[in-house]
Amino acid sequence: MANRDMNIRHWHDIPAAAGLLTRVPVQVNSGLATRRGPLASWAYPLVGLVIAIAQMIVGGAALWVGITPQITAGLIIATSVTLTGAMHEDGLADSADGLWGGWEKSKRLAIMKDSRTGAYGVLAIVLSMLLRWAALTAVLQSNHWIAALIATAMISRAAMVALMTGLPNARDTGLSQSVGRPKPVTAWLAIGTATLGSAIALGLIAGSLLIVAAVVTSLWAGIAHRKIGGQTGDILGAAQQFTEIALLIALSVILLPV
């Protein structure tokens, strides 16, 4: 049984990933989740898919009753924030404060761990919300906005797994360290899952989105490695945010006719 529990995939990985990345109350076998650790991260894109479905329901209902795309975009973002408990937004704010508010690794990590939010963090959140809202408003005027939500949610969470695999832990404690580092096969499975879902939703456009995600994730990984020598849970949350923003901007250009 123990060997079977350590297979590349396990059905329990989906609720375990949902329990980690969202505030949705799910039944999780804590013992199995602990044993599998980073192996469950392949399911992060599937959690993104669930979030996208919730966004689709809210957005579809809003547009159906005549709510404008601008307001609908805000409601869709609010749905994501509610389901995740602003987990990724918090990571973005902490990363901005720490990486640009400190002059050395130990100070940067200390700032990132501080629950208070500084000027860099506030500006990062404001800019993130504005960019996502503007890009999503444009995407909602396309007939493929549902597919865009699915691809964005899945790929941006696969980016987190890639970063977990590619960078060492920057500190000996924290959420990322407690989860552990996935093996390359787990990262490729997450990327493959996101690619499949995106390809089904958007067809060949998914290839362009994967390139955008790879570039953004690589740049962010380089910054994190240079400033703190690796990744933390905050760095991973920021990676999801940066990737989502970049994908929505790309889709606002790709999906709308010139």
Image (spheres, rainbow, N blue to C red):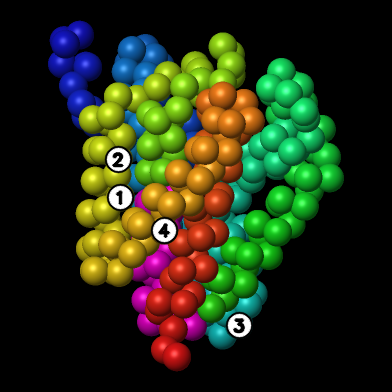
Q: Which mark is residue 190?
A: 2
Marks 1,2: beta carbons within 8 A = yes
Q: 117 or 225, which is in the foreground?
A: 225
- The residue sitting at 77% across, 28% down in the picture is 103
Q: Which mark is residue 194?
A: 1
State the extent of the magenta-drawn residues as a range. 140-156
For marks 4 and 3, the one nearer the N-term is: 3
Q: Where does the image place residue 57, in percent across and percent down from the top left?
A: 45, 65
Cα distance in 3D space between marks 4 and 2: 17 Å
Which is more foreground, mark 1 or mark 4? 4
For marks 2 and 3, the one nearer the N-term is: 3
Query: Where 139 falls versus 50 (above or below)?
Result: below
* Amino acid type, residue under disc 2 in the picture: Ala
Marks 3,1: beta carbons within 8 A = no
How dense is the environment of label 1, judged by Cα within 10 Å: few (below 14), some, or many (20 and up)? many
Q: Where does the image place residue 55, in percent across and percent down from the top left?
A: 48, 61
- Which residue is under mark 4? 212
